[in-house]
Image: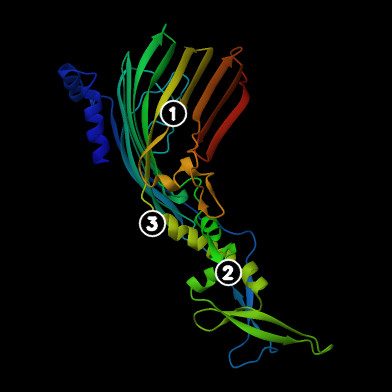
Amino acid sequence: MKNLLLAFCLLISFNTNGQFLKELYNDFLKYGTFYVAGDASNAYEQTYKDYFVERPEDGNLYDIPRVIDVTDYYPMDYRVGLGFRKLARFGYEVKAKDYYDGTENNKSLSAPTSSVKGLEYLFHYEKERERGEEFFNSRFFIRHVGKYHIVKLEQREQGNVGFKYQSAEVRGRLPIGKKFSLSAGAIYRTHQTPYGYNPIEIWLNETEIYTDPSGNEFEYPKNPWYTLGFEYGYTDHRTKYTDLNTGEERYDWIWKDSDGKIVAWSDKDFRDEIFGDLMNLYNREQWDLLNAFGEIAPIVGFDFYHYRKNFWLHAYGNYILPYHKYIAGDENVSYLNRNNWGKGGLKEDAMLEQWDDYQAGIIFGWKLSKAIGIFAEGEYTKFWDSEIYNSSVGINFTFR
């Protein structure tokens, strides 16, 4: 975050003067709100309990078993956080409470511009527990909107889904009338998730060339699927099975874990019951070895905002053009190479594949009369492999 703040100061210095810095200092605290808040609630409870049976102590398999409650019970859910915010609301955003607790979601966090010019910010940090799992969430947002510029820094972490994101952008802004504006500039973004990179698929597709005594070359898998078990301490043992009814004999492999316990009675059982978990474990371990990715690209946007008490329309959009350049992280496993891995590894002379990212939203409301009103709103975001969308539509009728 220190680096982001330093970058912010450098960025604004290009289109500001000493007077701006003075105003920044004078206005930073005005209309800002510091808050500390928390909440607690019952944790999730299953409708029906789960049970299991165990043989009684000093008993055998066929004695009356003990019935054991194996239902998952969780301590209470809670959230506690603190923050400092200065965010302007659009005219259609009604303040739901007379206080702030960190759960608010202002449209100005998504729209390219704000309802007012000047500095806005949000610094929020919280700890949360849900179903017994504790995690941290944070969001740091700084933006300055002027008549002809937009400068924004953002950092966000959502611990329960492993989401981490940072961005910094500078745009020139062109107002067209009082309600519409266009913007264009550059955006720097980071992502921790290696979108498009599947380590286990790459590992399984590695090949080797074998040359026989006659000079013929054969390509074969370097890593047969079952050898992943060896990497995690499993061993296979060739075993003969005999059908007691027919006398038929067959051979297969029994698999044991590192403690010598049998976990599968055949290769098929091992692949169906154990191998899937090992694949996911291998992927997580390989992903954890990677540093965060950082890329820069051009960005354009628009914003239209019209508000009257009986009718309002707010539409906005951001488009990140397909000219992405990675300046942090391993480009070989970046999103640019998401479709360039195949049999034998990274395809030789493969072309880097660009992509489009975009975000758009619309908020509409119309009070047809004092008693009837209709509304609709929605937002769609596509970043890398992630798609996020939400929408709502409805009608209000007030009895008078």
Q: Position of residue 283 (x, y in %)?
A: 49, 58
Q: Are marks 1 and 2 in contact (CB under 8 Å)?
A: no
Q: Position of residue 325 (x, y in %)?
A: 39, 35
State the residue position of label 1. Answer: 110
Q: Is residue 249 left or right of residue 120?
A: right
Q: Position of residue 99 (x, y in %)?
A: 37, 33
Question: Which label lies toward us, 1 or 2?
Answer: 2
In depth, the one of 181 and 291 nearer the eye is 291
Question: Which label lies toward us, 3 or 2?
Answer: 2
In space, the residues marked 1 and 2 are separated at their CA atoms by: 62 Å
State the residue position of label 2. Answer: 212
Q: Quadrant of residue 343?
A: bottom right
Q: Residue at x 52, y 45 (%)?
A: 340
Secondary structure category for the residue under label 2 = loop
Residue type indicated by callout 1: Ser
Secondary structure category for the residue under label 3 = loop
Counting other residues with Cα less than 10 Å from the Cα at mark 3, is it few (<14), some (14-19), or many (20 or more)?
Answer: few
Counting other residues with Cα less than 10 Å from the Cα at mark 1, is it few (<14), some (14-19), or many (20 or more)?
Answer: some
Question: Which label lies toward us, 1 or 3?
Answer: 3
Q: Quadrant of the N terminus?
A: top left
Q: Residue at x 51, y 44 (%)?
A: 338
